[in-house]
Every structure is written in C-alpha cells, then in structure tokens.
Image (spheres, rainbow, N blue to C red):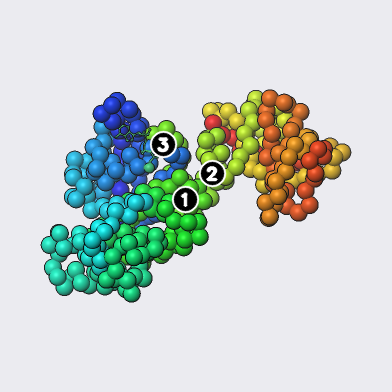
Amino acid sequence: MASLAAKGISKVFEDGFQALTDIDLVVEPGEFVTLLGPSGCGKTTLLKTLAGFYDATTGRIEIGGTDVTAAPPEKRDTAMCFQSYALFPHLTVAENIDFGPRQAGVPKAERRARLESLLRQVDLEAHRDKLPNRLSGGQQQRVALARALAMRPAVVLFDEPLSNLDAKLREQVRREIRALQKEIGFTAIYVTHDQSEALAMSDRVVVMQGGRIDQVGRPEEIYARPETAFVADFIGAANLVPFEDLGGGRVKTPLGELRAAVPPAGNASFICWRPEDVELVEAGAASENVIRGVVRDRAYQGAHTELHVATGDADLGLQRLHVAGAAPAEGAEVAFRLGADQIRFVR
Ligand code: ADP
Ligand code: MG
C-alpha cells in the first residue's frame, strides 16, 4: 500500500487537445478512490498518466512519497485493470496470473505461493487449467484482477473494469473487488461513469468534468452537499433554480421567495434540492417555502412516484418531486414545502 499524489497535472495531446487541467489529488495508502464523470471527461487519460503510459505535460506524480513523474510504467509499482480483460487467450488461468512474476524473475517458490493464494482469493481454483474463452465474463474479470495483483502493486488502477458485465454480476464483482482490496491491502483508483457504483464502492469520489476536478469528497458529502450544478445533477437527480440573494438567508427565485437555513456562498448561482426533499402539503397551506404547481406527468417507480410539476414560471422547466405512497394524478394542482435546510447553493 502506498499513497499517491498528483500535483498540478495537465495533459495536452499531440494534436493540441488539452484533456487534463490542473489536477490535484492525494490518495491515502489503502484508500479506495473513484474517478467519476461522463464519457470524455478525461478519466482514462488521468489513469494512464498516473500509470506512466502517458507523460504529463505539466505537474508531478508521487507514489509512496517518491517522484515517479519521469518513471516508466514498470517502475511505478502500479498495475492496471481494464474493461477489456486483455487476457492471453493461449495461456491457462494459472499461466495468465503467473505471467508477470515469471517475466520479472520472481523465484519459483514465491511465484507458486502467490498463485495459490490469488486463485483462492478470486475463487478460481477449480478453473486454474482452463483457457480464458472457457470462462464466463465475471470469471475472466477475476483472472484479470488476479493477474494485476500478482505483481503485488502498491496502487491498482481500474478502468471501468465491470462495464462488460450485466447489472447483477456487476454488483457481485464490485463487492468482491472491495473485499479483496481489504484482504490484500492496496491503494485503489477506480474509474467509472456509473454514479451508483462510485457511491457504493468508494471511500472518496472525485467528480470530473471537462478535464478538471469539480469536487472531491466522501460519497455522502458529494450527494448531500454538492458544490456545483454539474455535481448535483450528475450524482442523483437535482432541481436547479436561479436565485437572487435578498440577505438574511432569504432568496428570490422563479418559484417565489424562499428562506434557506444557510446563506448562499458568494459564487453560487443556483439553489438546488433533491426530488425526495419535498413534502406535499394542503392546497391552502400558507406557510413558509410552500410552492404551488400542476402535475404534468408522473412515473410510478415502486418505492416512490416521480412527479413532474409545472410551477408559475413557464421558463423554469418542470420540477421533479418524489412522493412516497399515494401520488396525485396528472393535471392535479399540488402544493409542496421545501424545508429551509434542504436548500443548498451550488455554483
Ligand atoms: P474518459 O475516459 O473520461 O471517457 P478519455 O480520457 O478517454 O475520457 O478522453 C478525454 C478526452 O481526450 C476526450 O475528448 C478524448 O477524445 C481525448 N483524447 C483521448 N485520447 C486522445 C489522444 N490520444 N489524442 C487526442 N485526444 C485524445
Ligand atoms: Mg475511459
């Protein structure tokens, strides 16, 4: 296990495209950090730069406190685990896992010990002599993982390793990866574009957009206290409404005047709340932070019903509300209260 630090990393490709800008990130030894963001935001580029497959245009990378900015991949004590498993098709499961240590000249007894413990840890002892094409997708992914771990890397870099698996298997393998990480002990940087995967697996989530880091935090922090409109909307669902600061925690919005428990930060441009943060109230209710509207459509989701509600301001777009239990019909007039402490401010 080792720490990893990226300091002021930028990456400009040969064609002049700047894929990374000012990336600052410190990952603690044994931490599991995910890079989360939409396709094209620079996740793979950052991972490959950390691994040494790309040179950083500017900045510095340290692993375990050692400057590795100029070191080739094999000198960085990292291993990469990809979505395409990249297994050698003509080698058995055991030979695939043993490949790295054998190339590196690890003594035979040590190689055997590593192989046996990895086969056990990824639950592939019964399949050790099979070729990869005889295995299921989940099993192939486990071989790829064991192969990455066979070199005992301090840092394992995962690039969307589960995206070829179906939803059910994905959940199972992600639990296995976390369990293995705790058992073996390595620092993990895990790329995904799947927000629920990031929230479920991570000690901390790094949300990226357009080659930059938008926000870093524990999953609960990222969800409960998004700092930008992008993060609010990308992690879960969010209603975003522009506002004018009236002072004293009061804001003027297209939904009416509202009171917020905390005053807006100077650089905020929107108020934000989650669909589940509201409560339906009596139509005549005349209390603070009550908003009126008409249900335009509704979608039953099992645990709740999602309502799309038009409020007085036609330009604003529909507000999303989640209602547990009996939900009002399309066309119904509704009133809902937005708690003062549910109102967040984002930039
Ligand atoms: P992600 O993994 O988040 O989907 P990537 O890191 O693969 O994103 O790519 C980030 C951006 O950099 C994209 O716009 C992509 O087109 C661009 N890009 C990736 N590789 C290269 C390259 N070798 N040369 C030029 N542009 C590239
Ligand atoms: Mg990618």
* Secondary structure beneath label 1: helix
Pointers 1 and 3 in contact (CB under 8 A)?
no
Foreground mark, 2 or 3, reads 3
* Dot placed on the residue nearer the N-terminal end, 1 or 2: 1
Residue 148 at x, y = what percent?
Answer: 28, 58
The residues bearing labels 1 and 3 have C-alpha atoms spaced at a distance of: 16 Å
Q: Is residue 346 above or below residue 109?
A: above
User: Residue 113: image x %, image y %?
Assistant: 22, 72
Q: Does mark 2's beta carbon lie closer than 8 Å to ligand 1?
A: no
Query: Label 3: which residue?
Result: 41
Q: Where does label 2 land, which residue?
A: 235
* Residue on which disc 1 sits: 198
Which corner quadrant of the figure contains ligand 1? top left
* N-terminal-most mark, 1 or 3: 3
Q: Is mark 3 within 8 Å of ligand 1?
A: yes
Depth order, front residue of 141/153: 141
Quadrant in the picture for the C terminus: top right
The residue shown at (42%, 64%) is 176
Q: Give coordinates of residue 301: x percent, y percent.
A: 67, 51
Residue 21 percent across, percent down from the top left = 35, 32
Question: What whole-number distance in Å separates the C-alpha atoms at marks 1 and 2?
Answer: 9 Å
Residue plotted at (35% across, 67% down): 122
Check contact, mark 1 vs mark 2: CB within 8 A: yes
Please say whether residue 289 is visible from this viewpoint: no
In the image, what residue type sits under mark 3? Cys
User: Residue at the location (16% across, 73% down)?
Assistant: 109
Relative to 36, 23 lies left or right:
left
Q: Quadrant of residue 131?
A: bottom left
**Callout 2: helix, strand or loop?**
loop
Label 1 residue near ligand 1, CB within 8 Å: no
* Amino acid at dot 2: Ile
